[in-house]
Image (cartoon, rainbow, N blue to C red):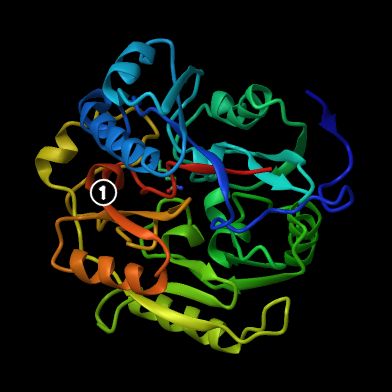
Amino acid sequence: MTTLTSTPRADGFFMPAEWAPHSQTWMVWPQRPDNWRHNGAPAQAAFAAVAKAIARFEPVTVCATADQFHAARAALGDPRIRVVEMSTDDAWVRDTGPTFVIDGQGGLRGVDWTFNAWGGLDGGLYADWRRDDEVAQKILEIERCDRYRTDGFVLEGGSIHVDGEGTLITTEECLLNRNRNPHLSREEIEAILREHLAIDTVIWLPHGLFNDETDGHVDNFCCYVRPGEVLLAWTDDPTDPNHERCQAAMAVLEQARDARGRALKVHKMPIPGPLHATAEECAGVAPLVGSQPRDPSIRLAGSYVNFLIVNGGIIAPSFGDPLDAEAERILGEVFPDHQVVMVPGREILLGGGNIHCITQQQPAA
Ligand code: KQY
């Protein structure tokens, strides 16, 4: 397939909102033993449950390494789930996969951002990440989509959300982090986002959720639910380290105007927990030099905002927390035309993310 030297905007392509119709969702099968306990077995069961929940609404493709192809096929069962062989470093296709762009006339292409494992050698989460940096290209080859490659511009899909009407929301903690694009100013980063996603306005939240190992991805903290309305992770507890982050985000959102000149309506979503891994859960991980530390003292960045919108459904994590029912109620309220399906997310959280992080929607062309 062709690697294009123009930009999506110049060619009339844009990133649609997540609620626009999908042709399928992509996932990657987890197996990395320094991130997933017991060589990934409990995470594989959790990912399979997510894939099966999504498959009730739209087709799913799961990429698995040669080692795991047959195990994944057997565990996933459902014929609406396609399994393809692909070499990868880990399983976060939100961040390693392409950001699909459409032109509204049947055209579908992909943006292949440079991936550096959330910070490269300056706080990144593993080395090396070369196979993960190739995931977007491989997915685009499979789908016969032309590709825009941003050599020299690092970005992960989980660090952005769009409303499909010209506005993007992100965090300074991630996009302005010195371990992503230290050679670029805020204005230069905005210019690249405008060109590659065809957005006009960027809303910068100061931070993401406390202890998020991605350096504050917005998809674990705040998302659009429709144009002009966002859902923000929230705590009223002043002793919670997230309190200041929530207040700072609210201050920005209350002042913001989107690309259409609208003020935003902000819905609040309580933060579960505080959640921590148990000693037993940590003991199942096989650390390498440079792996993320896993320890019960470290608060996990659990969030109900880390859900995926699919055709007619919302696939959201539950945590066995007393707030699970409230989260399901709020999601039902803000998405009255979708069926909310809660899927256990603790095992995914132990690896550092959740359902939105392990999925990548492919919009219908
Ligand atoms: O949450 C994500 N988008 C990725 C998390 C990566 C965690 C690796 N341990």
Image quadrant containing the N terminus: top right
* Residue 186 coordinates in the image, percent (x, y): 72, 65
- Residue on which the image places disc 1: 343
In the rendered image, residue 194, in percent from the top left (x then y), is placed at 78, 60
Q: Specify the quadrant of the image occupied by residue 334.
A: bottom left
State which quadrant residue 141 falls in: top right
* Image quarter for ligand 1: top left
- In this rendering, the answer to whether 345 lies above or below 201 is above
In the picture shown, does residue 157 fall above or below 216? above
Give the residue type that dot 1 points to.
Answer: Val
Number of numbered discs overlaid on the protein picture: 1
Which of 133/167 is in front? 167
Residue 121 can be seen in this image: no
Task: Decide if residue 42 is on the left or right side of residue 64.
Answer: left
Question: Quick check: 305 left or right of 265?
Answer: left
Q: Is residue 166 above or below residue 287?
A: below
Task: Report if residue 217 is visible in the image.
Answer: yes
Q: Is residue 364 left or right of residue 123?
A: right
The vertical placement of 229 against 359, above or below, is below
At horizontal 43% and vertical 33% (from top left) the residue drawn is 91
Across and down, in percent, residue 84 comes to 49, 18
| Residue at point 44%, 54% (across, down) | 312
Q: Identify which residue is drawn at 63% across, 61% down.
A: 176
Q: Could you tell me which secondary element the residue under label 1 belongs to?
A: strand
